Amino acid sequence: MTMTALDLSAYVGLLAVFLATANICLGLLIAVRYSPSRLWPHRRINIFAIHNWTAYVLLASAFTHPLILLFSTKNHWRVSDLALPLWSPVQPVENTVGAAGVYLIVIVVLTSYFRVQLGRRQWKLFHYLVYAAAICAFVHGILADTTLKGQRIDPLDGEKVFVELCFLIVVLSTGWAWRYRLRKDRAERTLRIGRYRIFNADPKID
């Protein structure tokens, strides 16, 4: 069976969803200061580097996903239809949600380059947009008809189940990270370590 442009675009879209899920999970590990060498899998792993590279590949796949539609023979797509999907030939709402996710990812990646100039507090506010981008990606992935025929969506379709599982993983991972951070803060506060460490200066002797 010959793979069409629509098929390839759908597969790249699923790759983008997977990368978004992985990137968010890695970001949560960084946020809670998870140590893979001290905890599972007891290996020295540069989570920050993997987090960055998944973001770059995610951005590339998010752009490639709609660009492939320019080669589709079923519908005539223009670059303007991809940049402003409200006027796209099919599924304008679903495609607009997907495009919004791509633009949010661009903002997150670009502001990461200027995090020193922006300052940690302001950069962090921009970085939280990755959650909004992920929501857009999940909504687009679940509601969009990959055949572009306007067919009724089957939530038990293999591709839809994949997107739904990725969404579930993000939700569960966010809940785990929140609970892990609370337990870690409670332990550090009790032991006076980490952020709650008390530094006592030695008395000055004349």
Image (cartoon, grey):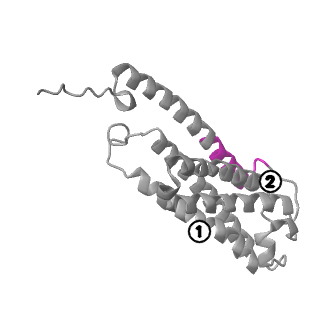
Please give the range of residues in magenta.
Answer: 155-169
Which is the main secondary structure of the residues drawn in magenta? helix
Q: Quadrant of the N terminus?
A: bottom right
In the depicted structure, whether residue 11 falls above or below residue 76: above
Determine which residue is flagged by label 1: 60
Q: Is residue 72 visible?
A: no
Q: Amino acid at mark 2?
A: Leu
In the depicted structure, whether residue 69 falls above or below residue 45: below
Please, which residue is most extreme toward the front here? 206
Q: Disc 2 versus disc 1: distance between alpha carbons? A: 22 Å
- Give left or right: position of 146 versus 194: right
Count neighbours of disc 1 (C-alpha within 10 A) and say few if under 14, some if 14 to 19, many if 20 or more: some
Residue 136, position as x, y percentages in the image: 72, 53
Q: Amino acid at mark 1?
A: Ala
Residue 86, position as x, y percentages in the image: 85, 65
Q: How many marks?
A: 2
Residue 73 tag number: none
